[in-house]
Amino acid sequence: MELNELRQGINEIDRQIEELFRQRMALCTEVADVKSRSGMPIFQKSREDEIIARIRKEMPEQLKGGAAVLFTTLMDISKMLQYERISGEQPAVNYAELDLSEPADAAVPGISGSYSHIACRRFSEKLRPNFCDSFREVFAQVESGKVRFGVLPIVNSTAGSVGQTYELLKEYDLKICATVKVRIDHCLAAREGVRIEDITEVRSHAQALMQCSGYIAAHGFRTEQALNTSIAAKQASVSSEPIAAICSEECAEEQGLNILERSIADADKNYTRFILISKETLIPRGADIISVSLALPHESSSLYRLLTKFSAAGLNLTMIESRPIANTDFDVVFYLDFEGSLSSPQVRTLMNELDFELSYFKFLGSYREIR
């Protein structure tokens, strides 16, 4: 047969598949009605396992894997239709509107002049910073109600994600309600009288040290981690040793340090995204990003099936991050950001499905970037 004839045959089979697909999905919506009336759950793992086992048995060896993928995808699409039919207009999350027009206290890591302090002002000039020694203290103050908001870095364009922030988001039941992107422009600063050739040790936050690793290596500096860049600047200002800090120029000036060299980061365009967290579920108008965390079963194609759900719902994933779970055999938690609104039926259906089917699922917030 010629290629055109073969393609015509494939096109005819595809049309048959299209019609059978429509028929299958129509039957699935009727199944949803039956399940709803009888109080049966939509997700029935034993039924899915039974279908896949039958398909694998009936298919030739070279098609077993592909057929299993095809039918699991069909079943996932079927379930989405059923969840959408049953969930109706029920909101996925109850929330209040974020309002930053009134004065409020915000926990901020570091001291005055830190990048987190700069981000705090970017969120709102009416936020009153309450400086903390650690990221954990920020979360603890927000959870206790001592402050209404907290400000933390979550990802850097050069050094990647801030692992401690992700770990604390899993540990504490707090919500992200806004993000802001801050240009990071590191300088090398030391107290009066200290020259670059005198310096043996440089202190800063681990992320800042990574962002300036090329500069540090070129000068042969020994490094010491500090809780954040502003505390490193404070330490440099009071030390009798010839140490320097990597920090913002604003922080160096506030601590009375001399700026020995500017713009020392390895990348010219270096940005950090900061999050604003709250104990309340607060969502701003125009929120277009949703963050969730979840755990997947140790089963073949579990990550593929998760991604298929987003694709079938027409939702764009903008970030996927995995973090190991302590005291487990390499189990991980996934953190996902995707574009969408909580008012969207597709978002509502997907979140209800994930919440029901997964052993661990957590809504982390819906927000937009403040510019």
Image (cartoon, helix red, strand yellow):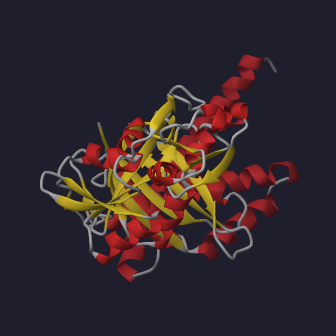
- Residue at (70, 33) in percent of width and height: 219
Which quadrant does the C terminus fall into?
top left
- Residue 221: image x %, image y %? 69, 40
Does 172 sit above or below residue 89? below
- Residue 147 drawn at (x, y percent): 26, 68
Q: Exactly how many numbered labels are in the figure? A: 0
| Residue in view at x 65 percent, y 72 percent | 326
362 or 256: nearer the viewer: 256
User: Looking at the image, which is closer to me, 10 or 114?
Assistant: 114
Q: Residue at x 56, y 30 (%)?
A: 264
Quarter of the rendering containing residue 250? top left
Q: Is residue 149 visible?
A: yes
Q: Residue furthest left?
A: 102
| Left or right: 282 in relation to 180 | left
Q: Is residue 181 left or right of residue 21?
A: left
Q: Position of residue 42 (x, y in %)?
A: 47, 71
| Residue 20 visible in the snapshot | no
Quadrant including the N terminus: top right
Instruction: Please name the residue shown 17% across and 51% down the image.
Output: 126
Residue 173 sits in quarter = bottom left
Residue 155: horizontal and vertical position, in percent?
50, 47
The image shows residue 71, relative to residue 279, as above or below, that is: above
Closer to the camera in the image, 199 or 168: 199
